[in-house]
Image (cartoon, grey):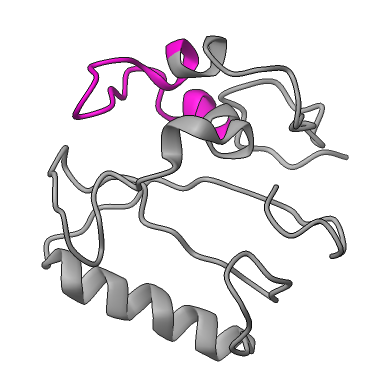
Amino acid sequence: MGFAAQPAFWNAAAAIRWDGTAEALLRATQSVESDVGRTPSFRNGPREIDVDILDLGARTRPSDPILPHPRLSTRRFVLAPLSEIAPRWKHPATGLTAAQLLLRLPERPRATRLSSRPRGSAAPDP
């Protein structure tokens, strides 16, 4: 997706509880990226880590961070894990679940699930 001349990367989704502002969450994600060693690059270029805010309590925002994430509904690699961890989540603008949005996407580019662990299982693969 995006800049093709880069190594394959892992993608994950996580649900967190956040009581602060959207701006404070953006600063926190940028701090995590910096701590891991992310270095400035060009848009969609190779990077060590990329932490995106997909949604924040069904809020909509036109400015940074834009909520929901503006490309969320076009990215299989985002919607696939999101549909697993939050099957009842609905896009604030369309009302569609991540699984419903997935059905609207073309088959390519693909997202490959690396774990064979059953959904809902917290145990790591052996």
Residue at x-position 80% and y-position 32%: 112
Residue at x-position 87% and y-position 63%: 5
Residue at x-position 82% and y-position 37%: 114
* Residue 66, above or below 20: above
* Residue 54, above or below 116: below
Residue 26, image x and y in percent? 29, 72
The answer to whether 25 appears left or right of 116 in the picture is left
Residue at x-position 19% and y-position 75%: 24
Membership of 36 in magenta stretch? no
The answer to whether 103 appears left or right of 117 in the picture is left
Residue stretch in magenta: 81-100
- Magenta segment's dominant SS is loop
- Quarter-wise, where is residue 98 in the image? top left
Residue 78, image x and y in percent? 55, 39
Closer to the camera in the image, 40 or 32: 40
Residue 119, image x and y in percent? 62, 22
